[in-house]
Image (cartoon, coloured by chain):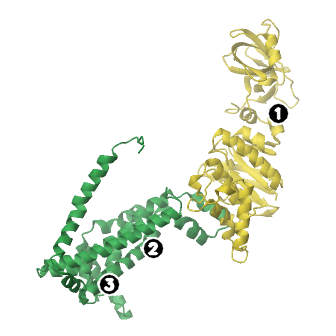
Amino acid sequence: MARTTRVLPGFGPALGLTLTWLSIIVLLPLASVFLKASNLSLVEFWDVVTAPRVAASYRLSFGASLAAAAINAVFGLMLAWCLVRYRFPGKRLVDALIDLPFALPTAVAGIALTALYARNGWIGQWLEPLGIQVAFKPLGVLVALVFIGLPFVVRTVQPVLEDFDLEHEEAAASLGAGRWQTFRYVILPVLLPALLTGFTLAFARAVGEYGSVIFIAGNIPMVSEITPLMIITKLEQYDYVGATAVAEVMLLISFVLLLLINGLQAWTAKRTGRDR
Amino acid sequence: MSIQVRNITKRFGAFSALDDVTLDFPSGDLVALLGPSGCGKTTLLRIIAGLEAADGGQVLLEGEDASARHVRERQVGFVFQHYALFRHMTVFDNVAFGLRMKPRAQRPPERQIREKAQRLLELVQLDWLAGRFPSQLSGGQRQRIALARALAVEPRVLLLDEPFGALDAKVRKELRRWLRRLHDELHITSIFVTHDQEEALEVADRVVLMNQGRIEQTGTPEEVYSQPATPFVYGFLGAVNLFHGRVDGEGVRVGGDLLPGTARADGPAEGARVMAFARPYEIDIVADDGADGGMAAKVSRVLSFGVTTRVELEGSEGQHLEVELTRERADALGLAVGQTVRLLPSNLRVFEYEEGAGI
């Protein structure tokens, strides 16, 4: 193999260090989960992870997380757009507010949301007559997940949008493209990879979220229990093996979904000629 | 299509980018807007395109007021200095973009769009790059694609903003010639902005010289080069020698020397402070130090290559002067570095003194 000359050498040590670090920080804990779960026989394992209550929690956890990430993709893009394109009073304040869900202890967020959306809460009392219940329903889970996932899309899309050259829009307009066409065919494709990254991060965060959700979800079996709660419940009953089994399934599903989204990202990058 | 610009003004804060600019661009001409950076030429181009709104005045396209019309409806092709190609689309899709964005009722069938894009790629001689992405192209290729993309929608006017500004010297020259040939084929009314005088003179049918938001002169390249209307134009176009002095009879007195000139009736009054210009080839050298008239100068360098010999001299007041002679003339004079000679301008142009004008 020909040696390539680089300004900064050190491929060997850098890669070695990276892999070691990743092993200690990520792979080792994960491996212990799998090891622990292997105390179960296959049949026992299957029974634990497909118990109706657990299965219902998968649906809620992954369904609500995907939905929350999708909502955040749309509104996060809008927020990023406003922050980059327009000047308005209080812009810095808005910019700082966006990171708040990052900093807030999730339990605080949960309590605040519950207070708002409970039947007698500020918002809840207006929704109640309309027949919409948020707190203690799957909808409440969605609201909490939207809240904690907000910063991701904004912060990934913002820099790309800042780099976007206005000349491209002018070029599109001079070629006769309408406003929507310019957005759809000129701007959106450029933002798509960043948007997907933000979506992935928001999704991953939502799947693992616990603190804010359990307050507002009400944790009604088969209705509003999320998978992390199932794991905690099992732990509280000293069912360590059962807890790790469910955790294992959660990990696998998450991993497969993340791989899929990454694949999608690589595909968009390739399609748009940036993969070189 | 003809373009007329009437009394256009544009301010950016306290800075006046365009100050009451009125211009006619005849149909089918290739016109250069030439001037130093910050003179307002790009702003004017963007106002004609509709990318920028003027504070006052009108833009008439084919005699019709287009001031209120959106860039989308003006049917102008705009070519940007940095190409502005859509980097997520192939070269082919870039060229086809304008056609595909047409309202459904006007949009040609996909087969026709493909044929047309193909034809345009052939026109700019880059059909072999159809499947590539802009990032895989050289600067010159990108600009040709940008031009093909603009031409696809059959614009009534083609506007080019420093189209070759980001390219290196050699590619620039090639593209210049190529643009001229293309224009001779298509005859589409075109305006291009440049700060490169050579480019403007070489390519354009007409040149508009701008400075500080105003028009200094318009004319054919020949006219603006040989009969500059203002000190600015003199200084901006080509090499020139500048003398500061006062009107003395027919000539100009510079220090102790009298430069012969031809006073015009409408010229500056006797004794007025003036600036006088002469191009390097409009000055003769007299080797005899004792000769009468002209200005004493010391030869500091003699550069003989090509058909002409360039002589650099230091004037009596330390100013840098340049004279261009034919080879034969220079040989006959037998100039040596350090030798004192006299300079006799054969075509001295005299302007009233202006603060900050000229070179």
* Chain designation of label 3: A
Q: Colour of chain A?
A: green
Q: Could you tell me residue B31's position as x and y percent?
A: 78, 48
Q: Could you tell me residue B52's position as x and y percent?
A: 65, 58
Q: Residues within 10 Å of mark 2 (few under 14, many from 20)?
A: some
> Quadrant of residue A220 in the image?
bottom left
- CB under 8 Å between discs 1 and 3: no
- CB under 8 Å between discs 2 and 1: no
Residue B272 visible in image: no
Q: Could you tell me residue B78's position as x and y percent?
A: 69, 57
Vertical relation: B260 (above or below) B227: above
Q: Nearer the viewer, mark 1 or mark 3?
A: 3
* Chain designation of label 2: A
Q: Nearer the viewer, mark 3 or mark 2?
A: 3
Q: Are marks 3 and 2 on the same chain?
A: yes
Q: Which mark is residue A74?
A: 2
Give me the chain that's yellow: B
Q: Which mark is residue B226?
A: 1
The residue sitting at the front extreme is A1
Q: Amino acid at mark 1?
A: Ser
Separation (CA) of disc 1 from disc 3: 83 Å
The residue sitting at the right extreme is B265
